Image (cartoon, rainbow, N blue to C red):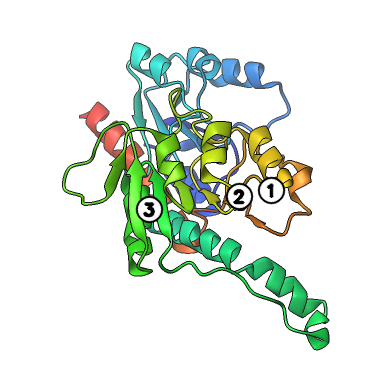
Amino acid sequence: MNNIGVLMTCPMSEYLENQLENRFSLFKLWNHSSPKPDFLKTHSSSIKAVVGNTKIGADANMIDSLPNMEIVASYSVGLDKIDLGKCKEKGIKVTNTPDVLTDDVADLGIGLALAVLRKMCACDRFVRSGNWINGDFGLASKFSGKSVGIVGLGRIGSAIAKRAEAFNCSISYHSRSKKPNTNYKYYSNIVDLAADCQILFVACALTEETHHIVNRKVIDALGPKGILINIGRGAHVDEPELVSALLKGRLGGAGLDVYENEPNVPEQLFSLENIVLVPHVGSDTEETSKAMADLVISNLEAHFKDAIS
C-alpha cells in the first residue's frame, strides 16, 4: 500500500504519523510552503485518503479538491469537522474511533465534576502559595449523592452514568428518544432535565440540532447552585451566555474540556475560582492515543484491502 496517498490534515500523534509513513505515501498538509489550494491541486491525483481530527477534518472544499479520495478516517469519535453530506454525495467512506476513548473521556468528566465541587485547583494554589500556614482552606461541596443529568446517553454518556452511580448519584438524561434497557429517568426536554439535576454533563454528538443545546434557558434552569460539565464539543454551549452566567452568579460552576473557538478561551473565565479549565484532553492518554491510532490504521488498511480485492 506504499503507493496509496494519505493526507494528514494537521499534527496529531507521532505514533500515528510514523505508522502512516511506514504503510502509505504520507502527505502532511501543514508541512509545505505552498498555499493549501495549490498543495491540494498538485497532489490531488495521488491522495486517496484523508486523516483528520477534531481540529481539521475534511470540509467541502477539500473534498472537491481531491477527486480520487475514497475514505476519510477521523482520529476522533466526533465527525463534526467532516462534511458528511458531501462525502455521501461522492460515495466517500467515513470512519472514526469509537469505544477506545470512552473510558478516558468519562473518567475526565467525573474528574472535572470532582475538581469543581471539591475546589481542587484552588486547593492546589492555596498550598503552593504557602497560605495554609495562615489557616485552613475552607469548605467545599461533596459529589456523592448529587443528582446527575446527562445530555446524550450514548457510549460516553452511559459510561459517565455508570461512574456516577458508584458515587450513589441519581441519574437522569436527555436524548433524541428514550433509551431501552435503562432505568434512568428520561426527559424529552433538556430545560426540565437541567431544572431537576445538580450537575449537568454534556456528552452528545455535535449536530445542527445540538448546536447551542445548552443555552440561557438551560443554564438558568440549572441555576446558581448547579454545575455544568462539558466534555462534548464547545459549540454545544452558548459560550457568551455561559460566561455571563458564571460572572453574574447565575450558574454555580463549570468544568470545561472543550470550547467554542479552540484554542481561544474567553479570558473572563481565567480569574474565576468556581471553574476548572482543561485544554481538550479528554482522550489524551498514552494508552488511548495509541489505540486510536491503531484503529485509524486498521480502518484504512481494511478499506484499501477491500478495494484492491
Which mark is first along the chain, 3 or 2? Answer: 3
Marks 2 and 3, how far apart at CA: 30 Å
Q: Is mark 1 on a helix, strand or loop?
A: loop
Q: Is mark 3 on a helix, strand or loop?
A: helix
Q: Residue furthest bottom?
A: 133
Residue ID at (26%, 50%)? 184
Residue ID at (48%, 66%)? 143
Where residue 279 appears, as percent x and y from the top left, is: 63, 51
**Residue in the foreground of this view, choosing between 28 and 100:** 100
- The residue that disc 3 covers is 102
- The residue that disc 1 covers is 249
- On screen, residue 216 versus residue 131, left or right, reads left
> In the image, is residue 23 above or below residue 104?
above
Crowding at dot 1, Cα within 10 Å, few <14 / some 14-19 / many 20+, comes out as: some
For residue 224, which numbered disc appears in the image? 2
- Asked if the residue at tag 3 contacts the one at tag 2, i.e. Cβ–Cβ closer than 8 Å, the answer is no
Q: Which amino acid does label 1 sit on?
A: Gly
Marks 3 and 1, how far apart at CA: 32 Å
- Asked if the residue at tag 2 contacts the one at tag 1, i.e. Cβ–Cβ closer than 8 Å, the answer is yes
Where residue 276 appears, as percent x and y from the top left, is: 64, 57
Crowding at dot 2, Cα within 10 Å, few <14 / some 14-19 / many 20+, comes out as: some
Marks 1 and 2, how far apart at CA: 6 Å
**Residue in the foreground of this view, choosing between 68 and 269:** 269
Residue ID at (26%, 33%)? 177
For residue 195, which numbered disc appears in the image? none
Residue 101 visible somewhere in the drawing: no
Name the quadrant of the N terminus: top left
